[in-house]
Image (spheres, rainbow, N blue to C red):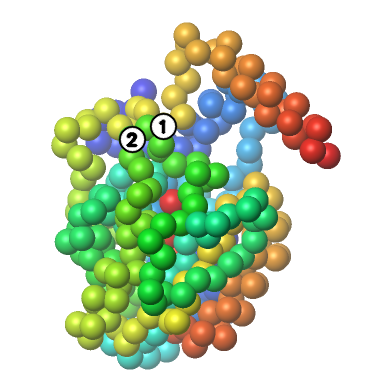
Amino acid sequence: MSLVARHLEANGIPTVIIGSALDVVEHCGVPRFLFTDFPLGNPCGLPWDRAMQKAIVRQALGLLESAGGPRTTVKAPFRWKEDDPGWRARYGRVDPAERARLLALGEERRRQRGTKK
Amino acid sequence: MTELGEPVRYIDRTRHYYRALGYAKDYVWARHDDVPFARLHKPLAASRIALITTASPADFKGTRQVWSGQMTPPPAKLFTTNLAWDKESTHTDDRESFLPIEAASALAAEGVFAGLTGRFHGVPTEYSQRKTTEEDAPQVLQRLRDDGADAAILCPL
């Protein structure tokens, strides 16, 4: 998506990304980025929290006008659910006890890709 | 380990995960030193805004391509199962949490911006950066021009 933003900007259309993968987006380099520090999947606010979602979109719109130059990143003033403090460690974790299962999963994926070709 | 409160380092996390799956080569994430920057041509209050998602249509059949949907009425659900998001920590049952059509419409009604374009657009997340840059991004640009968009909000899951 960052590559799409870059293409639109290079052709004169201002963009703002609302996203939760800070390192991926900043690594690529984009014009305007509203960082929402949530698990991947709900960049625009917690599910069903209409007030938060509206506030996030309002902030993103503001960045369209206020950003003074490229690589403008702003962090939205919201946090993930207080009753789920362990979310950061969860995504894509590699549990040592799971190594054999993950390796088998990878083998299966490669086999499927091979048979599709 | 991730320190409490620090943003998750997804590039490192993904690298470790795919090594555990037995892949020999690490994915090379896009990186650019130069970043293009366009300014609004008119005040935000007079600008027409497009929304772009990485989700697929609800009736997704497996063909990954740029697609478009009507903002009105907004879709109840979109297909997201094929995307990499934190399926243990959250869900995508609330489309507004990743494609906020109703939130944006409410802000347009308040006069924050002139209005949404008639359509939103979907861009597949591709392993191939070449496909995104050379095929998909130009298609999105054309669709935004056809829709009269002055700016776009992009919401990757």
Query: What's under tag 2, amino acid-wise?
Result: Ser
**Circles 2 and 1: CB distance less than 8 Å?**
yes
Q: Residues within 10 Å of mark 1 (few under 14, many from 20)?
A: many
Q: Residue A116 lies in what quarter of the image?
A: top right
A34 sits to left or right of B33: left
Residue at 75 percent across and 26 percent down: it is: A111
What secondary structure is found at the residue carrying circle 2? loop
Badge 2: chain ID = B
Residue under label 2, please give it: B89
Badge 1: chain ID = A
Percent from the top left, x then y, of residue B4?
25, 30
Residue at 16 percent across and 37 percent down: it is: A82
Q: Which mark is residue A91?
A: 1
Q: Residue A106 lies in what quarter of the image?
A: top right
B15 sits to left or right of B64: left
Residue at 25 percent across and 50 percent down: it is: A46
Question: Can the viewer see residue A112 in this picture?
Answer: yes
Q: CA distance from mark 2 to mark 1?
A: 8 Å
Q: Residues within 10 Å of mark 2 (few under 14, many from 20)?
A: some
Query: What's under tag 1, amino acid-wise?
Result: Tyr
Residue at 63 percent across and 42 percent down: it is: B28
Percent from the top left, x then y, of residue B60?
58, 55
